[in-house]
Image (tube, helix red, strand yellow):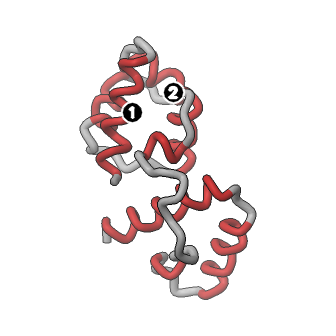
Amino acid sequence: MMMDLYSNIKRLRKLHNMSQQELAEAVGYKGKSMIAQVENGKVDLSASMITKFAEVLNVSELELMGISGNAVTEPPEIYLISSPADDKKEELYSVYEGLTPEKQVAFEAYLKFLQSQS
């Protein structure tokens, strides 16, 4: 799923006739080498960076990650976060509850990605 994110960034950048340098500047990176690394899947993007890329490329976070709007029908998978403190999980869940349904799906996808990296 995350490889969809990286290939979609490249595809949408090209669709918008943007150079890697232009995209880098638009999302706050210093140079095009960082975009090359992102497009090759060598950089893990934070949720806030996914949002920046989505805004610049004029798509939703879900579209950018290649997720359909109905992809997640189960409760949030907050348990995937490895935190010694239960209050941290409670805090994450309260953040999750305040998100739009679309952003909840993106949040869950990001949690699954984090789990796959451990």
Q: Residue furthest right?
A: 98
Dot 2 and dot 1 residues touching (CB under 8 Å): yes
Quadrant of the snapshot with the N terminus: bottom left
Disc ID at residue 9: 1
Q: Which residue is located at x 54 percent, y 53 percent?
A: 69
Instruction: Please state the horizontal and vertical placement of residue 52, each as a whole percent of the image.
Output: 56, 36
How far apart, in angstroms, are the residues tagged by discs 2 and 1?
Answer: 8 Å
Numbered disc 2: secondary structure: loop
Q: Amino acid at mark 1?
A: Ile
Q: Is residue 72 above or below residue 1?
A: below
**Residue at the disc numbered 2:** 57
Q: Is residue 38 left or right of residue 98?
A: left
* Quadrant showing the C terminus: bottom left
Numbered disc total: 2
SS label for mark 1: helix
Mark 2 Cα within 10 Å, few/some/many (few <14, many 20+)? many
The numbered mark, 2 or 1, whose residue comes first in the sequence reads 1
Q: Is residue 102 left or right of residue 64?
A: right
Does residue 98 appear left or right of residue 40 in this picture? right
Image position, residue 89 (x, y; %): 61, 80
Q: Residue 40 at x, y = what percent? A: 25, 37
* Residue 23 spot, x, y in % from top left: 45, 22
For the point 45% across and 51% down, which residue is it?
67
Tell me the kind of residue under disc 2. Answer: Leu
- At 33% across and 37% down in the image, what residue appears? 38
Hey, which residue is sitting farthest front in the picture? 70
